[in-house]
Structure formats: structure tokens, C-alpha cells
Image (spheres, grey):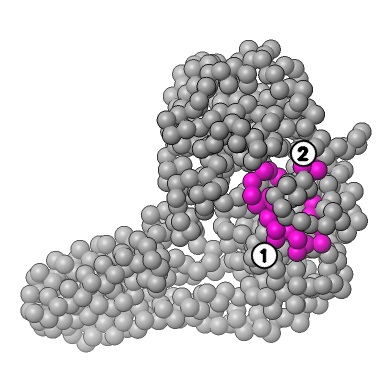
């Protein structure tokens, strides 16, 4: 299960930022690098204006050129934006001041003609209008896809994300005209182009908002006609689609019509890429009223997002938490779990975890359903000691939000992988997707990938990067390994199903304290991670890869953590229980 952790001390604003560029895109109201950067740009633009007013047109022109280069670098969007375009309306005040300095320079140079004045006025209007457009973009309309009887989601075709960068280009062309007396026509043409895009986007947004309001009754009728028996409610940060993707195939195998309800444009785009069942974007709490129809009986949840409470408020529905993994982490005994009618858990260990941490929940609110996602995990074919060249899966967790959940071993990951390579092991490296949200952990991932790439052994069969993280499922990573090293993570319990040996990294904790806090560690070989390295690394790897003295205890603990289907297929534990509610 995913949980907050922050061994690197990354705060929430940095967690949400995907890169340095994203940090610089933060609004001026944020406390952080984005706010400081915006203030510095604004001050620089005011200096340019003051220098121009003082009649120092050459100096002003040089300063303006530098300012426009910086603005250009940080108004060109990187990647695709599925919600509010990150560059739209960025640094509009700075661009307006730059435009004013162009006008002042042009007056000193007597180089502004009728086209020049028209360009300056229109360009100022475009820059001011961007702020209004950005606010309009925040009111992204609800969207529908794959629902019979409803218009399908329309992807915006206008290059709105380029408006800020194009306006900087227009200012640069205008500055060239003002300083050197060039014709103003190029600046005017670029201004007219970006202005046309702005006007078309404005009317398009208004029409979509009007359609969304008029379409509410038709949408309800379309959902009623589709007659879903259950729904999946999902609200999560971008890039966490694994939370829902792990459950969609099994929910589809229930053979009942259902819908996916998402709450953000980013989640809408991600869900559309995962399924062909109806996906409905409902931005606000009141929007949910339109799709709660008589046929809908149950709502499943895959995380503890705050927005879940807006759906749980419907008393006529059965609310079931599926979650997206099972581990001994704190989120696996979150008191919020009390608000659901049922909590589907993998095994008895999950139930006992709540009790042992003082979280009292009625036993009737739990149902043991196993982890259907591991139905394809292959069992160990023999003792690890008989494998001549073991293949070890290293699956470290990530660094999140709070220091008390600093479980990631990636800081010593390169040391660990090098030790495996020195033993002649093959390595499958699959870090948690969130690892790349931390610069420090990203650097560790890069170093590990470089170590694996540099291994010149002719028999080496390492898997990392796209192969291990994208092309292979987690089960395939399990099946392509003989042993695993991980941290406090849901993958540990899942790997238990394979009967293969596993090791856990005890980060900033002694072995005894670690086992007390995380009981699953009783059947794992513990690698104590300290500030200077890993304690008894070689001896622990000998146990993991050769003698495996915990083989029998590990086998006994499997049922406690993962349930027991008896002679039936493992996933039937889930299907039998879910069928009661759909």
C-alpha cells in the first residue's frame, strides 16, 4: 500500500512539483521558490521600466532582452497539461511591465507608428485576458466518455498552453521594432494570432460550461439507461493510476455494468487510457447527484482521498474500501476506514493490525478477500540454494510527506545493488513510481540503472527502466525473480504468496524494533540501514540467497496475510465476496 514518507524532507509543494520548471510555475501566493522567482521577475521588469523612463534606452533595451529570454524559458510548457495549462497567464504582470518599457523606449526613439500603437494596445489586452482565461480554465466542465447516449469527451485542440510563450515572442518583436525602427507588422501579426486563439478559447469554454449545465437531465437519463450496479470512485494525484488499474480488470470480471467516477481532469485522462467502461468527471460534490441512479447499489474506493466523503454521504449505497495494497504501514490502519460499510482486506493480519494500533472497528466491517492481483504469481519451484545464478527483485518504496514514515532504502540502493552484482546475481529493479518525485531518490534510481547498464557479464539478464517499470506487471517482476529485497511496502505481502525468500530494509531502526512495528518482518531477512551503510550485508545476503532458514515460517504466515481460498482459484476469494454487493 502506498503511504506517506519523506526521508528527504520534501514538503507537500515540492512533492506535487514534477520538476524545477514546475516549481517555477507556482503562483506568487505560494511560499517557496515559485513565489521568490515571480517576485524577482516583477522587480526586474520594474527596473527596466525605471531605466527606460530615465531615458537610458540602450541600457533598458539590453535589460529588456535579458528579461524576455528568461520569460521565454519559463513560459514554454513542458509535457502535456490535462487540467489548467501551467503556463497560461504566467507572469502576466511582468509581461505587462515589459510591454510598457517597450512603449517608453519607442517614444524615446520616436519609432512607434499607427501599427505600433495598435500592437501595444492589443497585446496588453491579450496579456490581461490570459488571467481571465486561466480562471475560466479552473472551472473545467464535467466530462463523459464511453457512456451510450452522451456526447463523448472532446479534447481541446487549441494550443492555449502556448499563449504565454507566444505573447513573449510578440513583445520581443515589438521591442525590436521600438529599438531599431523595424516594421511593426510581424509583432502585430503574432499578436493577432494569439488574440484569435484567446477569443476562440473563451467562446469554446463558455459554450462548454453552458452545455454542461443544460445537459444534466440528459446525463441522468443516460446513466439510468445504462443501469450501473456499482461504481468506482477515484480521486488521486496525477501519476497514481496504478491505484485503480490494479482493480479494473477484476471489477470487469464481475460481469456487471459499472461506471468510473473521477474528480479531476487529470484522473479523467488517466482512467480513459485504462478502460472502455463509462468514465464520468464530476468536479463538485453537487455534480454527484446527477449520477446516483436507482440501479446503483455499491461504490468501491481504492484510496482514502478526502473527496471520498462526498460520495460516502449517500446513505442508500453500500460503500466498500478496496485500497491499493496491504502492508504494515500506518495508512493500512487509518481510522478513516471506519466510515466505509465494508473494508475488503487481504487477510486476518489486516484486521489485527487495526486492533493492535488501537483503532477499533466492528468485525462486521471487514471481509477477507485476498489479493486477487497476485493470482498469476508463480510459486517457487525449489530451494533458493539450488539456483546457480539467482535473480533478485529490488523493489524499494518511495519518500513521501512525513519523517515518521521514512521507509525508503533507496539512499543505500546503489550499495545494495553493487553487492548483488559482486555475487553474480541478476537484478530486477522496480522502484515505486513516486520515487521519481524526490530529486535525491531519482538520483539513486539513476545510479542503480547505470550500475546495471555497466555490468558487462555475458550472462547478465538484468531488468530495469521501462522493461521492469512499464512493460512488466508487478506479478511478472515477481515471476522473473528468485528472491526479493524491499522496504515496508505492500509488495512484501504480495511476494509472500510466491514462497520465495525475501529481505526487508530496516531504515533507521534496529532489527528488534523493526519487527515489533512491522510484524511481517518476522519472516524476512533484515538489512539494517544506518547512516553509514548496511549492517551485516554479506551475512544477510547469504541467508537470503543460500540457506533460507525462514522458508517454513514464511509459508505458514502466507495465509495469515493473504487469506486461504482452499482448493479454489485464489481470486475467487474476491469474486465471491464482491458478488454479494453487486
Q: Within 10 angstroms of label 1, few (less than 14), some, or many (20 or more) residues?
A: many
- Per the model, the C-alpha gap separating discs 2 and 1 is 31 Å
* Place of residue 102 in the rendered image (x, y in percent of width and height, measured from the top left): 19, 77
Labelled disc at residue 62: none
Q: Confirm whether the magenta stretch covers residue 298.
A: no
What x and y, as percent, mark residue 441?
Answer: 46, 42
Q: Secondary structure at mark 2?
A: helix
Front disc: 2 or 1 = 2
Q: Label 2 crowding class (10 Å Cα cut-off): few <14, some 14-19, many 20+?
A: many
Q: Give me the residue at 73% from left, 47% from top.
A: 356
* Residue 375 placement (x, y as % from top left): 79, 37
User: Residue at point 12% right, 75% down?
Assistant: 51
The residue depicted at 51 percent of the width and 38 percent of the height is 508
Q: Which residues are magenta?
A: 326-349
Q: How many marks do you count on the picture?
A: 2
Which dot marks residue 561?
Answer: 2
**Magenta segment includes 346:** yes
The residue closer to the viewer here, 503 or 360, is 360
Residue 262 got which mark? 1
Q: Which one is in front, 255 or 542?
A: 542
Reply above or below: 263 against 15: below
The quadrant holding residue 231 is bottom right
- Please, is residue 529 above or below residue 386 in the view? below
Image-quadrant location for residue 321: bottom right
Callout 1: helix, strand or loop?
strand
Amino acid at each position: 500500500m502506498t503511504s506517506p514518507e519523506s526521508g528527504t524532507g520534501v514538503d507537500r509543494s515540492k512533492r506535487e512539483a514534477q520538476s524545477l520548471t514546475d516549481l517555477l510555475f507556482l503562483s506568487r501566493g505560494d511560499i517557496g521558490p515559485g513565489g521568490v522567482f515571480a517576485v524577482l521577475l516583477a522587480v526586474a521588469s520594474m527596473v527596466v521600466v525605471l531605466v527606460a523612463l530615465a531615458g537610458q534606452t540602450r541600457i533598458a533595451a539590453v535589460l529588456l532582452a535579458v528579461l524576455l529570454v528568461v520569460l521565454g524559458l519559463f513560459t514554454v510548457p513542458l509535457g502535456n497539461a490535462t487540467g489548467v495549462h501551467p503556463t497560461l497567464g504566467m507572469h502576466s504582470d511582468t509581461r505587462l511591465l515589459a510591454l510598457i518599457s517597450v512603449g517608453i523606449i519607442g517614444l524615446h526613439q520616436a519609432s512607434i507608428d499607427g501599427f505600433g500603437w495598435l500592437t501595444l494596445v492589443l497585446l496588453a489586452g491579450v496579456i490581461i485576458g490570459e488571467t481571465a482565461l486561466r480562471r475560466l480554465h479552473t472551472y473545467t466542465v464535467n466530462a463523459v466518455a464511453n457512456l451510450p447516449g452522451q456526447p463523448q469527451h472532446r479534447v481541446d485542440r487549441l494550443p492555449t498552453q502556448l499563449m504565454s510563450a507566444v505573447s513573449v515572442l510578440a513583445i520581443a518583436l515589438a521591442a525590436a521594432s521600438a529599438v531599431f525602427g523595424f516594421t511593426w507588422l510581424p509583432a502585430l501579426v503574432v499578436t493577432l494570432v494569439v488574440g484569435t486563439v484567446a477569443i476562440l478559447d473563451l467562446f469554446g469554454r463558455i459554450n462548454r460550461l453552458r452545455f454542461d449545465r443544460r445537459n444534466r437531465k440528459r446525463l441522468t437519463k443516460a446513466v439510468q439507461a445504462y443501469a450501473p450496479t456499482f461504481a468506482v470512485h477515484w480521486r488521486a494525484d496525477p501519476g497514481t493510476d496504478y491505484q485503480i488499474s490494479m482493480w479494473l480488470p477484476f471489477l470487469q470480471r464481475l460481469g456487471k455494468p459499472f461506471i468510473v467516477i473521477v474528480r479531476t481532469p487529470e484522473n479523467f485522462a488517466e482512467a480513459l487510457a485504462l478502460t472502455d467502461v463509462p468514465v464520468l468527471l464530476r468536479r463538485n460534490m453537487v455534480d454527484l447527484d446527477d449520477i446516483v441512479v436507482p440501479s446503483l447499489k455499491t461504490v468501491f474506493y481504492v484510496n482514502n482521498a478526502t473527496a471520498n466523503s462526498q460520495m460516502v454521504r449517500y446513505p442508500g449505497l453500500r460503500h466498500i474500501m478496496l485500497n491499493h495494497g496491504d502492508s504494515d504501514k500506518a495508512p493500512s490502519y487509518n481510522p478513516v476506514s471506519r466510515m466505509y460499510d465494508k473494508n475488503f482486506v487481504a487477510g486476518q493480519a489486516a484486521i489485527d493490525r487495526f486492533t493492535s494500533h488501537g483503532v477499533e472497528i466492528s468485525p462486521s466491517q471487514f471481509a477477507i478477500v485476498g489479493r486477487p492481483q497476485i493470482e498469476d504469481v508463480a510459486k517457487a519451484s525449489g530451494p533458493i540454494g539450488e539456483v546457480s545464478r539467482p535473480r533478485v527483485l529490488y523493489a524499494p518504496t518511495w519518500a513521501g510527506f512525513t519523517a515518521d514514515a521514512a521507509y525508503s532504502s533507496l539512499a543505500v540502493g546503489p550499495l545494495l545493488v553493487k553487492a548483488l552484482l559482486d555475487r553474480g546475481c541478476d537484478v530486477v529493479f522496480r522502484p515505486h513510481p513516486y520515487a521519481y518525485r524526490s530529486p535525491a531518490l531519482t538520483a539513486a534510481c539513476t545510479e542503480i540503472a547505470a550500475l546495471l547498464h555497466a555490468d558487462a557479464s555475458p550472462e547478465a539478464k538484468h531488468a530495469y527502466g521501462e522493461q521492469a517499470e512499464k512493460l512488466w506487471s508487478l506479478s511478472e517482476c515477481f515471476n522473473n525473480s528468485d528472491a526479493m529485497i524491499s522496504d515496508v511496502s505492500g509488495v512484501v505481502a504480495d511476494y509472500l504468496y510466491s514462497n520465495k525468500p525475501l529481505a526487508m530494509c530496516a531504515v533507521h531502526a534496529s532489527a528488534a524494533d523493526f519487527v515489533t512495528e512491522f510484524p511481517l518482518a518476522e519472516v524476512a531477512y533484515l538489512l539494517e540501514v544506518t547512516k553509514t551503510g548496511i549492517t551485516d550485508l554479506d551475512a544477510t545476503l547469504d541467508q537470503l540467497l543460500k540457506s533460507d532458514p525462514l522458508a517454513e515460517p514464511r509459508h505458514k504466515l502466507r495465509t495469515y496475510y493473504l487469506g486461504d481460498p482452499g482448493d479454489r482459484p485464489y481470486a475467487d476469494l474476491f469474486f465471491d465476496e464482491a458478488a454479494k454487493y453487486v
